[in-house]
Amino acid sequence: MVLLCYLSGSLPMRLRQLSVFSVLCAIALWAQNPASLKDNKCTLKGTVVKEPSSEPIKKATIELITENQQEGGNYTAVSDQDGHFQIEGIEPGRYRLFAERTGYIGVEKKQHRSSGVVLSFESGQQLKDLLIRMLPAAVITGRVVDQDGDPLPNVEVTVSRTNYSSGRQHWEALGSERSNDVGEFRIGSLLPGRYFVSASPPPDFQTLASASKEDAQAHGAPEMAYVTTYYPATHDRSQASEIEIRAGEESPVNFTLVPSATFRIRGTVSNLPASAETVVTLYSREFSLVSSTAEVSKNGTFELRAVAPGSYTVVATALIGENAQSARQSIELAASNVEGLRLIPVPGALVKGRLRAEGAGQVDLSQFFLLLHCADGDYSCMNAIPLGAGDPAQPARVKKDGSFEWKGVPPGRYDIQFAAEAGAVADYFLKSLVIGERNIPDATLTVSSTSLSLDLIVSANGGSIEGTAVDEKNRAVANASVVAIPESRYRNRPDRYHQAVTDQHGHFSLHGLNPAIYTIIAWDELDGDRYLDPQFLKNYESNATTTHMEEGSHINLVLQVNSLPDDSP
């Protein structure tokens, strides 16, 4: 029987062409050695421990997610009472592993938040003794009351830290919770560190001081209302103080909100039919959060009241049947009311086009996505998206014939960003944008009320960088972060940065790089996207590699990792 099977040829290569007799041979052969068909499957064993004591953590959920959904699968396991877990039957490939447990956060050696452990499996490999570290989460609790000590419900308390994106520093919210009916709040799942905390009452949550609103307006006095308060007790964000929270501890943070002088914004929305349903919304430019809303009267007037000093974008959104129009205006509110603001909504533009792929033969274009990103960090442009007019804030999926469109795009400047399904087309990059006769290599377009037709070309010949990250003793470093940082003119474009994490062998791979000059830096650990901050980068550029990527370039590097200080946030 075995001889006949041998004569039938190579079983794996001809499986679909086997005769009935050959199939019977295969069954007989499998019966003699049932493990032969499983030799290529892999196994992972590891332990989940609590930092810094190394105590085992039970009931942690382990998720092993493939980086290429077209080739591998996803696997899960749960740690036992000794913290051990095991996953069998893993297809060879490259994966990212995550651990989750209520009340804990996955971390690296220096207790920075983990973005997952990258693992590479070769056929039949058994990976043992993997150590997953988790840190007890920190918690912020407290209470919000008014000047008389009475509870204030429905106040949104937010925990934030400073971050950097699109060439600008901004506050990044890491968690928030609204106070309950007795003014209490609790925000958990926080990594130990230093944070800002703020308390923001709802837009319509106002109070009166000694005079009524009418009396205040009659005498020209500012209106008194509750506004966002930053810990410990300031309305000026620049005067806010950070608090430090520790692993596994509850840190108390209490707020007493006191009425503050506020202002009003009055204006008109013009050139609309009486049937239009129009709303005016006020957004904080620093956070892109709603600060206040007001309906527009039939004669086109509106009023936004109890607005704290600050930088804002005023957005008018008008629905006219199934169509929509919008307008936006930036204002600075410092020491007086704003009167006579005029907003003239215009229809959102239809931006459509066709995408063509070059350099790889036939490709399924429906794997691709396109995104509109507000250029120069002006996130307020997306605040003018009219309701019911499509959603240009969401990715446009390319159809099989290459067509795509966004409806109701507000006037403004946008970068077009290119993405694809995970692992499907890693080497592709957005090569060019053509509008009419104009070729726009940087894929930045200006939208007015006129519809646009775009031709986009993506290329399969994106540059790639592979290599190994090593320490000062030339030893491979697992789970290091490697970032390709673009030349200065593209550093306000987050899509031009490329990041990878090394596997257990210290190997990394970057794909789909645009032709440009890149600075390649490796860190043993990296908290979030701090590499977007130019001040942070200055500390590490002396230990970096600079390379000029051409279309289709393939470069191999050995990078020495930089080490973040232990007390880094």
Image (cartoon, grey):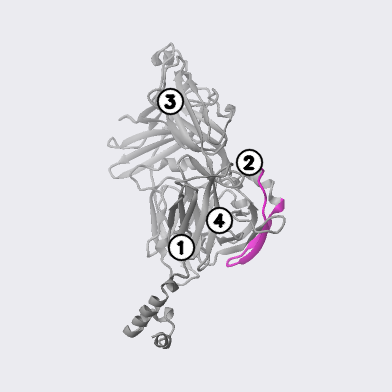
**Which mark's residue is nearer the viewer, 3 or 4?**
4
**Which mark's residue is nearer the viewer, 1 or 2?**
1
The circle on residue 109 is none
- Residue at the spot of label 4: 129
Q: Looking at numbered disc 3 in the image, what kind of residue is underneath it?
A: Glu
- Residue at the spot of label 3: 184
**Place of residue 340 in the rendered image (x, y in percent of width and height, measured from the top left):** 43, 27
**Which mark's residue is nearer the viewer, 4 or 1?**
4
| 219 or 47: nearer the viewer | 47
Q: Looking at numbered disc 2 in the image, what kind of residue is underneath it?
A: Ser
- Residue drawn at the location 66% of the way across and 62% of the way down: 557
- Residue drawn at the location 54% of the way across and 46% of the way down: 49
Alpha carbon separation for disc pair 1 and 2: 36 Å
- Judged from the image, the secondary structure of the residue bearing numbered disc 3 is strand
The mark that comes first in sequence, 3 or 4, is: 4
Alpha carbon separation for disc pair 4 and 1: 16 Å
> Tag count in the figure?
4
- Residue at the spot of label 2: 568
Neighbours of disc 1 within 10 Å: few (<14), some (14-19), many (20+): many
Neighbours of disc 2 within 10 Å: few (<14), some (14-19), many (20+): few
